[in-house]
């Protein structure tokens, strides 16, 4: 074992590194993004038992699973959006695995989101965060903490209104700053999708998809426990299933947090 990995193993064994689970549990009631009726919907999560220590299989328990790729806590690959459709390394099976681990910058918008369910993160908010915590480094995950994951009622989580979802997210200029000027690894949120609820009316529409994926960046949606992460210093591990030509997949997202000084 190399010196660096040996130090990591020692820190883990001494509980100097906390492992924080940023993943929501998949179950039949997991909220799935709602699209207008003229578009094809994503199937909800379902699980059917194959056998459970019985005559169908006396010594084993297992299930069949069915769901859309973008169900629960999930990874958006660049080919998920038309702007990234021609990227050779844009599918879940072609993304370089080095990109599945990256540092995290957590922008706390929880107070703003509590006051305004349609709160939009702007470049002004990002620059204010950078003034306090330093410039967002190239190749980092930028995660928007809103505490939206604490909405355990699926209806309140999706928060559909007559004019569409009322869910916080970034505006187009914020996404453009992160993707083009900061060259981030990707963008993550606690809501069901990476865009704000009203992003269909932005220019371009759905910028967290159009601009991020067009720039060969990733998305993470339906995260949780972002309130347990520091603004900087955590390391994110987010590896999607290796689905051939996959546009995304559910995954287990974890964060490594240095607690050696606690």
Image (spheres, rainbow, N blue to C red):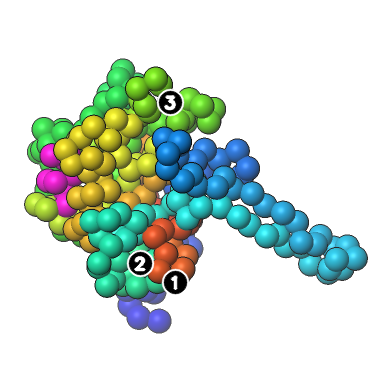
Q: Element type at marker 1?
A: loop
- Which residue bears the numbered disc 2? 91
**Where residue 33 sits: x, y (%)?**
45, 39
Highlighted magenta segment, given as a residue range: 172-179
Look at the picture and state if 242 lies above or below 49: below
At horizontal 41% and vertical 58% (from top left) the residue drawn is 248
Mark closest to the chain's N terminus, 3 or 1? 3
Residue 256 visible in the shown view = no
Residue 54 in view in this figure: yes
The CA span between labels 2 and 3 is: 30 Å
Query: Which residue in the structure is indicated by mark 3?
Result: 160
Q: What element carries label 2?
A: loop
Q: Give the Cα distance between marks 2 and 1.
A: 8 Å
Position of 128 compared to 230: left or right? left
- Residue 254 versus residue 232: which sits nearer the camera? 254
- The image shows residue 64 at horizontal and vertical percentages of 68, 60
What residue is rendered at 45% in x and 51% in y? 70
192 and 149: which is toward the camera: 192
Asked whether the beta carbons under mark 2 and mark 1 sit within 8 Å of each other, the answer is yes
Q: Residue at x 45, y 31 (%)?
A: 158
The answer to whether marks 2 and 3 mark residues whose Cβ atoms lie closer than 8 Å is no
For the residue pair 180 and 232, the one nearer the viewer reads as 180
Q: Position of residue 78 (x, y in %)?
A: 29, 59
Secondary structure mostly taken by the magenta-highlighted segment of the chain? helix
User: Horizontally, is 64 left or right of 221 in the view?
Assistant: right
Residue 48 image offset from top left, x and y in percent: 72, 54
- Vertical arrangement, residue 143 with respect to residue 94, above or below: above
Does the magenta run of residues contain 175? yes
């Amino acid at each position: 074992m190399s010196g660096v990995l040996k130090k990591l193993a020692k820190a883990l064994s001494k509980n100097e590194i906390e492992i924080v689970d940023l993943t929501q549990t998949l179950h039949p009631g997991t909220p799935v993004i709602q699209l207008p009726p003229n578009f094809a919907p994503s199937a909800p999560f379902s699980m059917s038992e194959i056998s459970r220590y019985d005559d169908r299989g006396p010594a084993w328990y297992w299930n069949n699973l069915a769901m859309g790729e973008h169900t629960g806590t999930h990874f958006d690959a660049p080919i998920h959006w038309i702007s990234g459709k021609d990227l050779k390394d844009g599918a879940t099976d072609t993304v370089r695995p080095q990109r599945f681990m990256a540092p995290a910058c957590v922008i706390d918008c929880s107070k703003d989101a509590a006051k305004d369910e349609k709160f939009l993160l702007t470049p002004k908010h990002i620059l204010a965060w950078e003034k306090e915590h330093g410039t967002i480094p190239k190749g980092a995950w930028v995660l928007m903490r809103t505490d939206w994951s604490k909405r355990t009622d699926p209806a309140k989580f999706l928060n559909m209104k007559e004019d569409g979802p009322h869910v916080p997210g970034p505006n187009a200029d914020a996404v453009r700053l992160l993707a083009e000027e900061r060259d981030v690894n990707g963008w993550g949120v606690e809501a069901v999708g990476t865009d704000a609820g009203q992003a269909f009316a932005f220019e371009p529409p759905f910028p967290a998809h159009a601009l991020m994926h067009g720039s060969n960046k990733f998305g993470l949606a339906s995260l949780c426990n972002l309130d347990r992460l520091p603004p900087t210093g955590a390391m994110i591990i987010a590896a999607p299933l290796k689905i051939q030509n996959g546009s995304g997949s559910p995954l287990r997202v974890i964060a490594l947090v240095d607690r050696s000084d606690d």
